[in-house]
């Protein structure tokens, strides 16, 4: 792919228009004093509009931490994060929350569904937060659930759904506000082959629309062929970003 990086790396002050997410020198530690652990040790990464980037790496290596930082859910120690043309690092926390709500979708590794709400209500949450009327939000939630194959489970509570069904609700919730940046943490981990493929098709379609992009953390080699590029996170750094040739992974 002909990328801006091929012509020299952009600096944080001059993010190339084709770059949806630019990470520079991102450092993140947890804990203090002797128990402090530096999980991200200077991450540099570009993700382009129109692509689906896969993020792989060992368990405990910091993939969820990096996704949370990119989504503005987690404060970082140092570095620069530019997302969809805005500097997340310079943004006030309230602005960041609203920015995330309007422009990003996040599929959490642990689903994070609200137990007292039905599947349709869970999916409607991003719309309700944005001020969409309740009836319309829930109607759109039901439509999104149909797209992930759960049209007959819209009124179920999460505890009455299987793990894979809960995962599909979580994906529907991330897609319902038509996000420009979709960030998914192991979105197929609880799904069987056919459902994993179906969900990845939906997720990939978001990335194919111009002006959008998708980042997916996965261990699931069955879905590698949906990616355009694969970034590997090892020992707190991105050690390689490679194009994916569908025929090699199918
Ligand atoms: N809130 C936290 N407080 C302290 N340590 C944390 C916290 N969140 C993550 N960590 C630590 O950071 C490291 C990276 O965790 P992270 O969840 O980002 O890994 P991961 O690559 O997503 O792993 P997995 O593939 O198992 O999901 C781990 O050692 C974890 O213990
Ligand atoms: Mg993780």
Image (cartoon, rainbow, N blue to C red):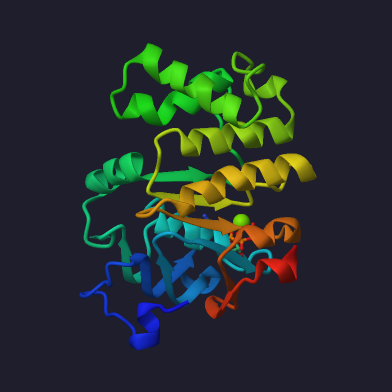
8 or 36, which is in the foreground?
Answer: 8
For ligand 1, which image quadrant applies? bottom right
Q: Residue 115: x and y, percent?
A: 58, 23
Work out whether residue 195 can be spotted: yes
* Residue 41 to residue 217: above or below: below
Q: Residue at x 27, y 62 (%)?
A: 89
Q: Residue at x 44, y 68 (%)?
A: 28
Q: Residue 126: x and y, percent?
A: 40, 31
Q: In this view, does 230 lie to the left or right of 1?
A: right
Q: Residue furthest front?
A: 247
Q: Residue 194: x and y, percent?
A: 76, 41
Q: Is residue 20 left or right of residue 120?
A: left
Q: Residue 238: x and y, percent?
A: 53, 77
Find residue 169 and report its image quarter: top right
* Residue 174 to residue 77: above or below: above
64 or 213, which is in the foreground?
Answer: 213
Q: In this view, does 80 lie to the left or right of 70?
A: left
* Residue 192 to residue 84: above or below: above
Q: Residue at x 59, y 78 (%)?
A: 235
Find residue 245 and report its image quarter: bottom right
Quarter of the image where the C terminus is located: bottom right
Q: Which residue is drawn at 45% across and 33% down?
A: 176
* Residue 46 to residue 165: above or below: below
Q: How many labels does the image show?
A: 0
Work out whether residue 114 can be spotted: no
């Amino acid at each position: 792919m002909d990328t801006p990086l091929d012509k020299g790396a952009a600096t944080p002050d001059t993010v190339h228009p084709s770059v949806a997410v630019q990470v520079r020198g991102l450092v993140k530690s947890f804990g203090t004093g002797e128990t402090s652990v530096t999980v991200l040790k200077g991450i540099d990464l570009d993700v382009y509009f129109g692509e689906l980037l896969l993020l792989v790496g060992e368990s405990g290596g910091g993939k969820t931490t990096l996704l949370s930082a990119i989504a503005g859910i987690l404060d970082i120690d140092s570095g620069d994060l530019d997302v969809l043309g805005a500097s997340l690092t310079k943004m006030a926390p309230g602005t960041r929350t609203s920015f995330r709500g309007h422009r990003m979708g996040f599929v959490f590794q642990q689903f994070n569904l609200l137990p007292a709400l039905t599947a349709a209500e869970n999916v409607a949450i991003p719309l309700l937060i944005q001020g969409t009327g309740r009836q319309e939000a829930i109607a759109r939630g039901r439509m999104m659930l149909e797209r992930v194959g759960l049209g007959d489970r819209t009124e179920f509570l999460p505890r009455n759904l299987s793990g894979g069904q809960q995962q599909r609700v979580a994906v529907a919730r991330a897609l319902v506000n038509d996000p420009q940046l979709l960030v998914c943490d192991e979105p197929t981990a609880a799904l069987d082959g056919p459902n994993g493929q179906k969900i990845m098709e939906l997720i990939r379609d978001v990335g194919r629309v111009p002006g959008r992009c998708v980042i997916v953390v996965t261990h699931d080699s069955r879905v590698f062929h949906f990616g355009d590029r694969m970034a590997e996170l090892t020992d707190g750094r991105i050690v390689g970003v490679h194009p994916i040739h569908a025929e090699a992974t199918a």
